[in-house]
Amino acid sequence: MTIPKALCGWLILLAIAFANGAFRAYYERYLGAHRANQVSCGIGVALFAVAVWIVDRRWPFESSAHAWRTGVLWVLMTVTWELLFFHYVAGRSWKELAGNYAFWEGRLWVLVLLAVLVLPPLADGARRSRVAIGSCLLWGAIAWAACGLVLSVSRICLGMEIALWLYLAAAPVIAYGATVACWNRPRHPRAVSAAALLTGTIFCLDLLIVAPFIERSFVMFESFRGTWAPMGLIAFTSLATGLLLSLPAERRPFLKWMPEDRDLEARMPGDSLLDGESGPTHAITIRCRPGQLWPWLVQMGYGRAGWYSHDRLDNWGHRSSDRLLPEFQRLEGGDRLPSTPDGKCFFEVLDLEPEASLVLGSHLTTGPVHSLRWAETSPSVSQRATWSFALISEAANDTRLRVRTRGVSAPAWRWMPVNAFFSVAHIIMQRKQLISLKRRAETQG
């Protein structure tokens, strides 16, 4: 990033600061000047973080030292602008301007300057380490919404006292699920990063949305059981889950069905069929040869052997077969594997290599929802997805089964609620399928 680009980046921050200051006048009527100033500082830091993240990707910092120098430059320019503009143009006294730095009186301007200083090196470090910031923030927001739903519904139905205890019980479960979902990406974060970003997102959303606009009071931050205890549980659970996932699969007491780095980084059959970043990947080691596992995959489908997952959810209540079915052992490219009783929704076999790989495709449209052939032209509202299975032979007669899904939706916004639901449901269903396949293949061959 050159000096002119650094100056341009600072002007972007300045524009955000002015817009944030103008918006503060709206909620100052509800919160008062002091609390509105605190909320404004918090919102400003959050907006600055997004802006610096975007600037770093448009004009990357050359090194960590360069990022720190940019942060120092931005702080000096910010302080100079504040003192000169607000004194000589806005007419504020030096005493009033100095009061903005009195953090012991609840003034948070110092935190804004600290953010301006450290955000460039943080953005640079995140880019170089390839931390999936977007995924962490997304799942942090989902976890925050889930926590809020648990607390609000239980408070309405059972009262605040019981609601707080239910919130304490639900917080670590939600953090566990969010961390697992966040980790299950091609660029998963490190354990500490995941815990920090997930917890930080939840805390910031409470600070910037719940307290000032929903509760209209910051008294929630005076409650140990209502705020600090669940935040601590969320941070601890997320960190512990991330550390557990950092271990090789054979060393995990559970979560053996979650992928390792080698699984996430491996190329899979079907990856080239859809553009964009790969979707969730799962993997499990099964004590059998690929030839013993392959027949169980070939016979999948509704009205066939089932899907080996939660049958009440994806196989219309029919129990998946616990034995090999000779009548369903022939599979060729273009064959359909039904997913509904009427056969209007189905997976199509896009590619297969016996005892090595199987790629299934789904091409959905609406009005009502039904499947199209993969080769058919996609209508304006449609979704394409691939479901790939790879069987990798390993030592000691083991098979590593990797499963990856990918999808493209058009228009993306219209499918967003459906995709949000299935992103969670898929983890649950895929876990069950892998465990069921492992049990069947190891016990029956």
Image (cartoon, rainbow, N blue to C red):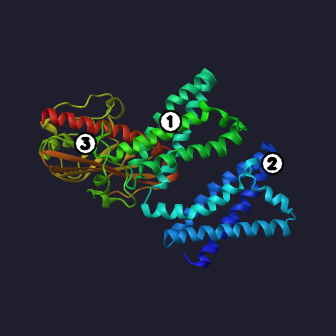
Of the residues under marks 2 and 3, which one precedes in the sequence? 2
* Residue at 13% across, 33% down: 444
Of the residues under marks 1 and 3, which one precedes in the sequence? 1
* Residue 106 at x, y percent in the picture: 74, 47
**In the image, residue 7 above or below residue 277:** below
Give the residue at mark 1. 233
Location of the C terminus by quadrant is top left
Give the residue at mark 3. 250
Q: CA distance from mark 1 to mark 2?
A: 33 Å
- Label at residue 33: 2
Out of 107 and 313, give the one closest to the viewer.
107
Q: Secondary structure at mark 1?
A: helix
Query: Cβ–Cβ below 8 Å for labels 2 and 3?
Result: no
Amino acid type at mark 3 = Glu
**In the image, residue 131 above or below residue 146:** below
Label 3: how many Cα within 10 Å (few below 14, some 14–19, many 20+):
few
Amino acid type at mark 2 = Ala
Q: Is residue 368 at all visible to an observer of this figure? A: no
Amino acid type at mark 1 = Leu
Out of 148 and 295, give the one closest to the viewer.
148
* Residue 67 at x, y percent in the picture: 54, 69
Q: Is residue 355 left or right of residue 317?
A: left
* Residue 300 at x, y percent in the picture: 23, 40
Of the residues under marks 1 and 2, which one precedes in the sequence? 2
Q: CA distance from mark 2 to mark 3?
A: 57 Å
Determine the image quadrant of residue 299. Answer: top left
Q: Is residue 73 at all visible to an observer of this figure? A: yes
Q: Secondary structure at mark 3?
A: helix
